[in-house]
Amino acid sequence: MPTLYDGDAEAYSNPAGQAYPARDMNRRRFLPFAILVAVLLLFFRLTVLRGLVPFPGDLLLSEYQPWRSYPTHGYVAGSVPHKAQYPDTLRQIYPWRIVAAEQWRKGSVPLWNPHNFSGTPLAANFQSAVFYPPNLLFAVTQPAAAWTALVILSHGAALLFMYVYLRKVGLSPAASVTGAVAYAFSAFAAVWSQYNSIVHVAAFLPLMLLSLELAAGTRSSLPFVLYSIAISLAILAGHPQVAFYQIMFSAFYAVVRVRKRLLFILTAIITGIALAAVQVIPGVELMLLSARTGLNIPTLLNKILIQPAQLLMLVVPDIFGNPATRTYFPGDTYIGKVTSVGFAGLVLAATAVLRKKPHRLTGFLVVSVMAVLALVMRNPVTVHLYAVGIPFVSSGNPTLAVVLLTFCLATLSAIGLDTLLSDPKIAKVSALLATVLIGIAWTGAALIVLAGSGSPMFAIKTPLLATVKSTAFAASFLFAALLMVLKVRRLIPAAIIFTVLTGELMLMYWKFNPFVPASYIFPDTVLTAVIKRECSSGKVIGNGAALLTPNTESQLGIDSPAGYDPLYPGTYGEFISSVWEGRVIENAEQFRSDAVLPPVFGSDPALTSRVSRAIDALNVTCIIGRSGDTTVETADPARYGLIYDRDGFQVYRNLKAVGNFVLFDSYTRYNNKYDFGSKFFADGGRLLLETVPDPQPQPRNGADKTEVTVKQPDYIELNVTVSGNRILYLPETWYPGWTASLDGRTVPVIRANYAFRAVSVPAGAHTVILAYRPASFKTGVIISFVSAGIIILFTAIAVIQPGKERR
């Protein structure tokens, strides 16, 4: 009688040769999808049953200002229990999604983020993923609902695409369901889940390979169209490095599987990248102009790459602890070291290699596993390889290639389950493998404990407790193997193995990922209301203990000179470096991702003077301090007026902030970046320019006036009336693509004060327009439209003249 593990259509005939009713066949075909949906809902049971959001709001309320300073949800200030995970979700991914959605709702393409770094490209930042179609959900529904739906969608898509791919390569429904769960909820997927980008990218890897499998069996162009679309969506989903790994992996896969049509494959790859050109071209431009530098080599080797001993995490994921429970003790990054697909998944993957007649993909997958491990582990090869500087790799996190390792192991685990089901004799070998692996785990745990003598008790207990848990999973697997040896009906041991694998991955996911009420997501506080009311005319920064976490300001509706992002304009980072050092520092690792000014109030007179000059020129109108901070006592009342003092917070108004639109009648010229620092900090409030403006400004001899008629993130329109030639200065970041017009006539946008915008305005009344219209975006749009046209054309041809199956 056919069951979930029967693979082919022929299996749906009973022993007498009579076909089962169509309804029964449809029910059986639907069963795997029902199981996948049930698994998905079970992983997100807290959302389904209690309406909780998969979002790190617990960390926000406990650690980030100003929220941590207010009692909330029955907890005293700063005491909300949290798992300490996903800081980048709070500081980057979620704020960018919301900023983009606000602009989409207003009918604008979200090209520019005005809230951080004194303004920075938004769409060009790959991780903002403004052109990824599912993210448009933020523009049409509540943020919490959109966020939740997209987190669930990422895992659901990975489940679906992986299942269909595994079925296409000839595996049974049972094996395909098991492999899909091992991939979609692997340790890698679990720790990146609430970034709401990387798992989306990962979901398209099996779709890419599915399209290649389809291409291998037909002369139709439709599989190549599907391949191009999958590549494009992977790029748009929000993490270019992971997408790059997947495209390269799929290209190698194509060489193995579709040798005779490699030209078509290359064309499809180029078309897929070109379809995403609206993202790729502005993104590459930003990369080239950004402050981002390569990773420090010692940090990369010692903290980022997987150390040889950490391969034990393949067997026992938490043998070194888990940061969500504050037990991870190696001192490096846990999320870069997770490689597990479950204990059962690992044993099944090893079993696949023992198959008498290997599956046609086994060799490729085994070689791929070894290659990926060689690239993500510290070894003699990587010590020299990453010192060279590889694009997308040396400047990022090489361990993101673990997505490929996870895919290979999950696929091998599916092959391994089919191997067990087709040849129960191999169950004895699988049992031996499970025993050996758990023995290795116990040996490793013992060595860790011995090496950790004198360490905190949790560093000794953690490896032992984690190994005990894995031993329980191993025992369950051994029981299933015993049932196979005893020739118990295959459905029972298969169900046990699937339950063991799913259960382990589920516990791992629940342990690491926070689920919170929607009210935990950037709630209003008394201070946020004050800031919105009093400080909307300029930028806001925090001082000392009141430092606002960079990028969260956008959720408060305010602008800030600070920011946190691997990709932001490099000239702005150099300006920030000059405030710290008194001179421009190029490629400083300190400002690789962070642009934060020194404290406004402090004990170093020279540094305080530079900060004061900078915040005036940046139009920082409000500084937030904490009561009891002794450095606040140094605030000069002649330039900082106290406007709020309550609940432990103080808000000072900067009385010398220049304003958002300033008319200068003179300037000082600097020769180069090395000359800038000495002149900027020694020249009072004068404007510094590197080029000579045309027309030259004239001494003030009458009243000047500016009136803002339109103010949008990427478009500003002003009516300017001046009695003489002036320079209109905007304390917002200069970046290629900003254009200016004067009464409809194009005029240059001048770089002022090293990193900001200015426009020369002749005497008289004028309309000045500044608009962000980058050529890179326009070029990208054209290429994307042309590529979309090519894809539509090939789709139409394939539909009109369907290809024949290849023999």
Image (cartoon, rainbow, N blue to C red):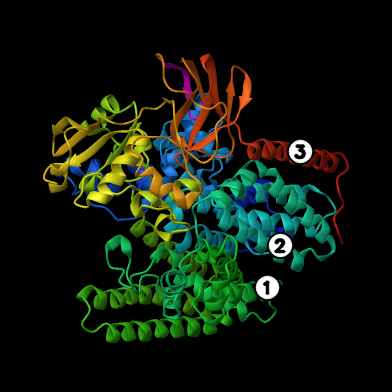
Real-space Cα distance between discs 2 and 3? Answer: 23 Å
Q: Give the mark nearest the N terminus, 3 or 1.
A: 1
Query: Mark 2 or mark 1: which is in front?
Result: 2
Which residue is depicted at the point 27% across and 45% down? 609
Circle 1 SS class: helix
Which region is colored magenta?
Answer: 704-715
Residue 364 is tagged as 1
Left or right of residue 410: residue 649: left
Point out residue 644 in the picture as x, y percentages from the top left corner.
17, 30
Tag 3 and tag 1, C-beta contact below 8 Å: no
**Does the rendering let one see residue 487?**
no
* Mark 3: few/some/many CA within 10 Å (<14, 14-19, 20+): some
Label 3 belongs to which residue? 786
Query: Residue 636 got which mark?
Result: none
**Secondary structure state at the residue bearing disc 3:** helix
Count of number-bearing discs = 3
Q: Earlier in the sequence, mark 2 or mark 1?
A: 2
Q: Is residue 723 above or below residue 348?
A: above
Mark 3 or 1: the one toward you: 3
**In the image, 255: left or right of 400?**
right
